[in-house]
Amino acid sequence: MRRGREAFLHSCILAFFAFLASYPHSVAAQAPPEPVERLTFRQAVDRAIANNPSSAVAAAVILRAEGLLSQARSATLLEVTGNVTTTTLNRGVSFEDTTVTPRNQVAASLTIDQPIVAAADWARRAQAQDNRDVAVLSAVETRRQIAVATADAYLAIIALRQLVEGDIRARDNARAHFDLATQLEQQGTGSRLNALRAQQQVSTFERNLEVANLAVYRAQEALGILVVADGPVDAGEEPVFDVPTDPAAAGATRAELAPVLLQARPDLRLFTGEEQAAARVLRDSSKDRWPSLNALFLPQSVYPGQFFTSPNNWRFLLQSSIPIFDGGMRSSLRVQRQAALDVATANLAGGITQASSEVRAARESVASGLRALAAAQRAAQEAQQVVNIVNISFGAGAATNIEVIDAERSARDADTAVAAAEHILRRARLDLLQALGRFP
């Protein structure tokens, strides 16, 4: 599901690029509200991990697991219970001026219980420790997901800001063309139609710029939510993701990657912990049938004492409980535990397969992204040269108004393609680090 959300985010960004490149309406461009602060990439990730409510929830889950561990441990330790009982009868019983049964009596006792053999309780204590360890691993995975979401928002701001820069260049080119068309019209060598077409182009690019500014503001708001800031937060710098060059990132097989990924990736460590916890629970199923043995020491004091009864006494007991017949309860529990282990094992196997695939796909995405960016940059440079040449030709009467508009749109589309290619490459590098367990 997490991978599905990331893919959805990527598709939304690319669809947004395509939407802006083709939308025909026009409005006046205005600057969005200023962000409350600017953060570097590392500052944004660290603040999100520290302040995001999901981190607090994960910490509370660990605290609850520690409480359950203490509760399970207490069942295997010494237990002391005190009891005080007061008894009042309607009348006492006496015989020859000797009190046989007093009317008012106070009895105080202690129950000291020490488990000697408690296999099921010992097993539950070990299982609670496993659950606590799983909660810690789950918190680490939660922090990783927060970091990834923060990185997505941060990179989206950078990509959309590049789109804004492209829209500004396109608008400025269109304005220059409009000014020239207006000048030629006033000189009598141009036409009103050419000026209107140029004005329409300016309005279209201004509208695109306004939409792009709003998209940047929304991305800044999203980053502000993640870092728990009181307003939008801007990306302060473009992060540099160094692509690993070790064998794990360069072409290792699934068998070679699996041990490395199991140690490096929090999600795989979580799957491993869940499998180990489920396996322990299944192994401990036999301990539910073991007998238990408790030693009990029971001192008691009664005041006033009864006739022929000592006011102070104690008892020592060895108490054993042996399961004989439970109607199939333990057998059904074992089946459920086996099913839980099967699910955990399948999750781990699927996680390893997916992680290996993510490494290969991210590695190929980086290589493809580099090639695509180089081609997009060449196309953008060539498109800008076309705009310059066509503008000069139009001023000299050697090119039509339609050719200028077409060149401007092509240049704007080329700038959009560069922004999209740079975003895809940055995200591919981040995906590779994430797939290898090296982010955050």
Image (cartoon, grey):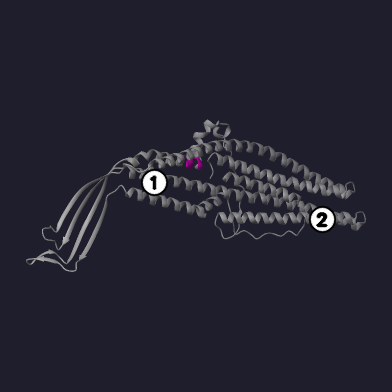
Which comes sooner in the sequence, label 2 or label 1? 1
Q: Disc 2 designates what residue?
A: 200
**104 with respect to 161 (left or right):** left
Residue marked by disc 1: 128
Amino acid, disc 2:
Gln
Secondary structure of residue under mark 1: helix
**For the point 64% across and 51% down, which residue is it?**
157
Q: Residue furthest front?
A: 327
Q: Is residue 284 visible?
A: no
Q: In this view, does 65 lie above or below 335?
A: below
Q: Do the residues labelled 2 and 1 touch (CB within 8 Å)?
A: no
- Chain part drawn in magenta: 267-272
| Residue 29 shown left or right of residue 186 in the figure | left
Q: Which residue is drawn at 70% across and 44% down?
A: 418
Amino acid type for the residue under numbered disc 1 = Ala
- Taking the magenta stretch, the answer to whether it contains residue 204 is no
Q: Is residue 268 magenta?
A: yes
Few, some or many residues within 10 Å of mark 1 (<14, 14–19, 20+)? many
Q: Is the magenta stretch mostly helix, strand or loop?
A: helix
**Quadrant of res 335:** top left
How many angstroms separate mark 2 from mark 1 (CA)?
69 Å
432 or 181, nearer to the observer: 432
Q: Where is residue 433 in the image (x, y as percent from the top left)?
A: 56, 41
In the rendered image, residue 63, in percent from the top left (x then y), is placed at: 42, 52
What mark, if any, has residue 292 been given in the picture?
Answer: none
Total of numbered circles in the picture? 2
